Image (cartoon, grey):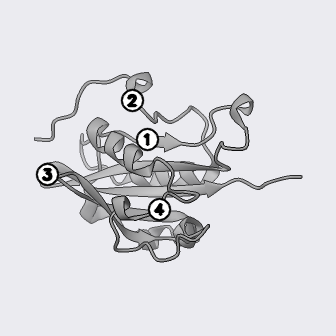
Amino acid sequence: MLWAPQMNRQDIPFAPPKAIGSKPAEVRRYWAGLKRGGNDIPFSDDLRLTALPDLASALVVIDVFALPQRFRLNVVGDDWRRDGATDVAGRFLDEVQPTSGFEFLQSQCAATVESGKPTWYGPRDAARRVEKTPLYERLLLPMWCDGRINMILGVIHRRQVHH
């Protein structure tokens, strides 16, 4: 049985806010629809990226390895491949330079696995929208098999910059 600590939403690092972008919300609905019975997390073998054809460029699939915990980029959509991150599929996160879209991704993956819950990264409010705050939001969703989280489905939503 999968061990999941009892945490409140506000106790989870990278906890999603109440309102998220349209792309993350659509992927989260798809993920929630994959849950079987009373499970809180969908099985990874139920994931079909072809069910989200309009979002393919925004998706990432990350394989989770245990002991030691490492994260390998399996599928990487074009929206993730900006700012020089073109050749990252098949590489572990600790081998990838943290360019736009990848900042704090390894930490967020670890929080997703430990909490067994969706996690989110992006600007929290207008007051924090300073130069170093990302112009995107990222949602990660845990998936499991054989009693452990073995995969993470992610989506990135790049914000339009208005000048």
CA–CA distance in space, label 3 to label 2:
22 Å
Disc 1 vs disc 4: which is toward the camera?
A: 4
Q: Count neighbours of disc 4 (C-alpha within 10 A) and say few if under 14, some if 14 to 19, many if 20 or more.
A: few
Residue 108 image offset from top left, x and y in percent: 41, 44
Which residue does the image show at 53% across and 50% down from the upper left? 138
Give the CA separation, mark 2 to mark 4: 25 Å
Query: Of residues 146 and 115, which is closer to you in this image?
Result: 115
- The label shown at residue 119 is 1
Mark 4 sits on what residue? 97
Q: Work out whether mark 1 precedes mark 4 in sequence or the reverse, and give the earlier one.
A: 4
Position of residue 46 measured from the top left corner of the image (x, y, whole percent) = 29, 63
Q: Which residue is mark 3?
A: 67
Query: How far apart, in angstroms, are the residues tagged by discs 3 and 1?
Result: 22 Å
Among numbered discs 3 and 2, the one appearing first in the sequence = 2
Q: Quadrant of residue 38?
A: top left
Secondary structure of the residue carrying tag 2 is: loop
- Give SS at disc 1: strand
Label 3–label 4 contact, CB within 8 A: no
Going from the N terminus, do you reach mark 3 or mark 1 first? 3
Task: Give the residue at x 65% y 42%.
Answer: 133
